[in-house]
Amino acid sequence: MLLAASVFVTCVLLSIGFIYLRESKYISFASASNLSEFAVELTESDITMYDGLEVTGSDVVNFIKKNLGSYTSTQTSPVYVYVETEHASNTYYNEAEIDNIQNFTHEKYIKPISKFIGEIVRDGNDVIVGLRFCCI
């Protein structure tokens, strides 16, 4: 009788242990998923802060310099910048036009005091591929 009771208690304890093991597996998967999402948000935060934000032309120029300035004219940045000014619309992929956006005689000039609104552009996989700045 004592042996049967010990086997029964052991089976109950093992069952409870397996239940907790299964639950902890689900919790760890959920935590890993949340951590991954948080990491993506953190890496995108430099760009997502401009979504719906009103900025000046000097902010747009600084953004272009910071994010596209390290890509030579033969390279393409993973994120493009589309700027719509009062006079023209231009898309920037690298450092090739950085000098022109500060030259007030050039058609790609961005006035430092102009007001722009930022908008993030994402592809079908929800990855940021560009940023649009439209003059307001």
Image (cartoon, rainbow, N blue to C red):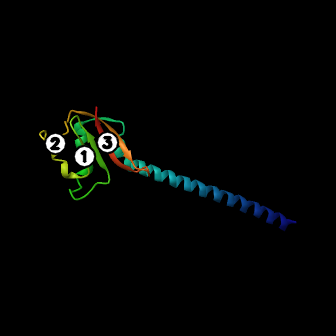
Indicate which disc, 1 or 2, sits on the residue closer to the N terminus: 1
- Up the image or down, 76 lies above or below 89; here it is below
Task: Give whichever of discs 3 and 2 has the lower sequence position.
Answer: 2
Report if the CB atoms under discs 1 and 2 are less than 8 Å apart. Answer: no
Q: How crowded is mark 1: few (under 14 residues within 10 Å), some or many (20 or more)?
A: many
Please name the amino acid that badge 3 sits on.
Arg
Residue that protrudes farthest toward the left in the picture: 105
Q: Identify which residue, 3 or 54, lies in the foreground.
A: 54
> Label 3: which residue?
132
Q: Label 2 sits on what residue type?
A: Gln
Q: Residue 33 vs residue 121: left or right?
A: right
> What residue sits 34% from the left and 45% below the top?
47
* Residue 96 sits above or below residue 86 on the image: below
Relative to residue 68, is residue 4 depicted above or below? Answer: below
Residue 23 lies, in percent from the top left, at 63, 55
Say the numbered circle drawn on residue 102: 2
Instruction: Give the alpha-carbon distance from disc 1 to disc 3, as whole Å.
Output: 11 Å
Q: Where the N terminus falls, by quadrant?
A: bottom right
Q: Residue 92, how many percent across, how many down?
A: 25, 48
Is 14 on the left-hand or right-hand side of 109?
right
Q: What element carries label 1?
A: helix
User: 87 and 93: which one is in front?
Assistant: 87
Residue positioned 26% across, 41% down in the render: 83
Q: Residue at x 36, y 39 (%)?
A: 51
- Find out whether the residues at labels 3 and 2 contact each other: C-beta distance under 8 Å: no
Q: Could you give the CA–CA distance between mark 1 and mark 2, rounded to whole angstroms? A: 11 Å
**Residue tagged by mark 1?**
64
> CB of mark 1 within 8 Å of CB of mark 3?
no
Callout 2: helix, strand or loop?
Answer: helix
Q: How far apart are marks 3 and 2 (CA)?
A: 18 Å
Mark nearer the N terminus (1 vs 3):
1
